[in-house]
Amino acid sequence: MVNEINALNVKIRSSTSPEDFLAVDSDSKHILRQLEPTKACLPGTDGRRELGISIVESFSNVILFNLHLFVRNAEYLDIACYCMDQVLTFIPLDSPNLPSCHLNLAKCLQHRFEVTRVLKDVENSIVHLTATLSQPGPRSVVILSLELLGTAHQCRWTRLFESEDMARALRYFSAALSFAPRGLPIIPTLHIRTSQLYFTWSQFDKGHEVEGLNKAIESQTAAVSLTTGGDARLAGYLHMLGRLYRRRYKRLGKKEDIASAMDALDRSLRLTPHGDPARLDVIRDLGIAYQTRFLYLGDLGDCDHAIQLHEQAVSLAPDGNPSLASYHSSLGDSYMEQFSYSGDQNDLAKAIEHQSRAVSLTTSDDENLPGLLRNLGDSFRGRFTRLHRPDDMKNALLFQTRAVEATFDDDPLKPNYLDSLGSSYQVRFGYESRLHNLNDINKAIEYKTRAVELAPEWHAKRSTFLNNLGLVYQTRFREQKQRADIDQAIEYLSQAVAIVPDGHSDEPNWLNNLGNAYKARFSSHGQLQDFKSAVGALSRAVRLTSQGHVNIPTILNNLANLYHLQFEESGTQEALDSSISYLQQSIDCARNPVQTFDTARLLANLLSSNNRPGAPPIYQIAMNCLPQVIWLGEVASMRIAQTSQLNDFVQEAAAAALRDEERHLALEWLEQGRSIVWGQFLQL
C-alpha cells in the first residue's frame, strides 16, 4: 500500500493532461477501496483500524502536498475534494485529528470555488469549518479555520449580498487576529484579508465607498507595517496599498492620496525582483497612477511617464503572458489621453494599434473582452471627431455593439458598454445633424436610457449614466428646440448631482453640466430663475474643484459665457465685467495651449468689440499659442478650413492692434500669420 501511495505521488506531479488526471482519480479511488474494510475493525484489537487510519493520513498528505501545484486545475481539485471527503469517513469522531481533516476539506472546497465559482462549495466549506471549531484543536488550526470562515462568508457575500455574511466575515477575521500571538506570520495575512473585504464592500455599496476605502487602507497599512523588508510578501502588500490609494484619489481627488499611491507602487517595484511575473503588473499599475494624476492635473510629464512604463511592461512581457492584452490596453489608453491633450495623430494611431492588439490577444470567452472592445471603439470614435472618416465611426459602432452583445444584462459592466455605444451615436448625430436625421440621437437616448435602467441603485457609476443621459437630451434640444428635451436634461442632470456622494471627484463635473443645461434653458426661454440656478451650479463647481485641476478653466469659461449671455440680454456692464473676469481667470490657470488660445481669442474679441482696453496683450497670448495649436489633418479639405480660420484670426488680431495704434504689432502678427498660412498650403 505504501508503494502505491508513493507511485500515486509521482503520477500526480507528472500529470499534465485530462487523461493523466483520470488515471490519478482511478488510482486514488482504488487505494480508498482497499482501505475501506479497516473501517469495520474495532479500535485496539488487532491494530488494523489504527494501521488503516495511519495509511489514509499518508494518502491525505500526498493529495494535500501537491495541491499548490494545481490550485487552478478543476480536474485535480475535484479529485482532492472527493478524497478529503472520503478521508473524513475513516477518522473516529473522538480523534484529535478530526478538526484538521475538516479544515483540509474546507481548503480544497474553497480552492475549487475560486476556479468553478459554484456557490455550493463555499457553503460546504462553511459547514466543515464550523465543525472544525466545534472541537478543541491546535491554535494554528483554530486561527486558520477562523481566517477561512471569514473568507468563505466574504465569497458568499459577493454573490448574495446578504449583510449577515459581511458582518460574519469581519467577525471571523477579527477573532483570528485577537487569537493569534504577536509576531505570528499569519497576522499580516489576516490584515490583508480584512483589507480585501473592506475594499469589496466599498465597490458594492456606494453609500459606504469612502468608509470602506479608508478601512481597507488602514488594514493594508497595518499589514505593510508588520511585514519586514526581507519578507517576500511585502512587495505584494505595497502593490495593493498603492492601488487602494489611487482608488481613493479617483474618488476624492486629494493630492496626498496619489502621492501615497505612487510612493507605495514605487517601493513595490524596487522590492520585486527582475523576472518575477508580478513585476510587470506593478509597472503597469504605476503607469496607471501617473495617468490618473495626468487626467486630474493636466501635467503632460505624467502622461509621458505613464507611456514609458506601459511600453516597458509590453516590451518585457513574453508571448503568451496572460496579462499582455491588459498591458497593450493600458498603453493604448495612455496614448489616447495624450492625443486628447496634444492632438497629435501619431498618438491616436498608436492608441488604436495597441488597443487592437489587446483585442486580438483576447479569446472570445474572456470576461475582459467586452471592456477591450469598448475601449477600442472609444478610440475609433476619437479619431472620427478629428478626421471625420466614416469608416472610423463605423468601427466605433461595430466594436461597441459587440461589447454590448457579449454581455448579459445582469453583468454590472453592461451599463458602461451601453453608455459608450450611446455616446458614439450621439457624436455621429453631432456631425450629421445638418441632415435633420434624428435616428442617431434617438438611438443614443435609447442606449443611455437602458444603461440607467440596468444600473442598480448601488452601482458606482449610476450618477455617471444619469449625467450622460441628461447630456444627450440636451444635445437633442439644441437641434429640435423642444422644451420637453431641456426639461428632461435638467431632470436627469439634477438626479446625477443629487445621488453623487459629497466630496466625490465627479461632483464638480456634474454641477458644471447642470449649470450649462440651466444656461441653455435661460438662453431659450429667458427665465431669470434659470440664470440664477446656472450661476449657483457653476459657482459651486468651481468651489468644489481642487486648485490646479485641469477642469477649472472649462468651468470658468462656462461662467463667463453665462454672464456674457446676460450682458447680451440686458446690456448691464456688471454682467460684462463678470464675463471678462472669468475669462481672465480661465487664461491664468489654463494648461492646455488649445484651451488657452480659444479663451484668449474670446476675451480679446470681447474687449475689442465693447471698446474695452487691453485687447492687444490678450491677442498676443493667443498668438504665442499658435505654433502649439496648429494641427495638420490628413484630409486636404480640413487643412483648407483650418487655414481659412487661421487667416480670419490673424486679420482680427491685427485689426484690434491697429485700433489701439499698435502698428508694429499688427505688422508682426500679419507676417507671422502669413508664414504659418504659407506653410499650411505647402502641405496640401
Image: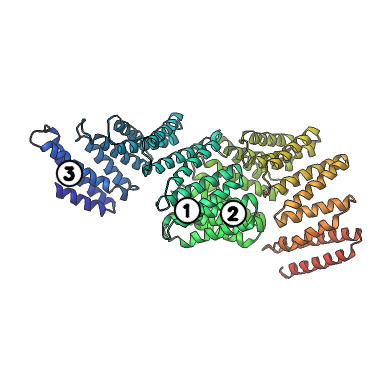
Q: Which residue is mark 3?
A: 31
In this rendering, does residue 326 appear at all? no
Instruction: Please identify, in this view, whether the residue under mark 1 or under mark 2 is nearer the observer.
Output: 1
Q: Which residue is mark 2?
A: 379
Query: Mark 2 is on which residue type?
Result: Ser
Q: CA distance from mark 3 to mark 1?
A: 47 Å
Instruction: Please identify, in this view, whether the residue under mark 3 or under mark 2 is nearer the observer.
Output: 3
User: Residue at the location (86% across, 51% down)?
Assistant: 607
**Residue situated in front as seen by the camera: 594 or 427:** 594
Query: Mark 3 is on which residue type?
Result: Ile
Above or below: residue 661 compared with residue 251: below
Q: Which residue is mark 1?
A: 268
Q: Position of residue 239 (x, y in %)?
A: 48, 50
Q: Quadrant of residue 184?
A: top left
> Of the residues under marks 3 and 1, which one precedes in the sequence?
3
Above or below: residue 420 compared with residue 633: above
**Residue situated in front as seen by the camera: 191 or 650:** 191
Above or below: residue 645 compared with residue 132: below
On the picture, is 436 further left or further right than 149?
Answer: right
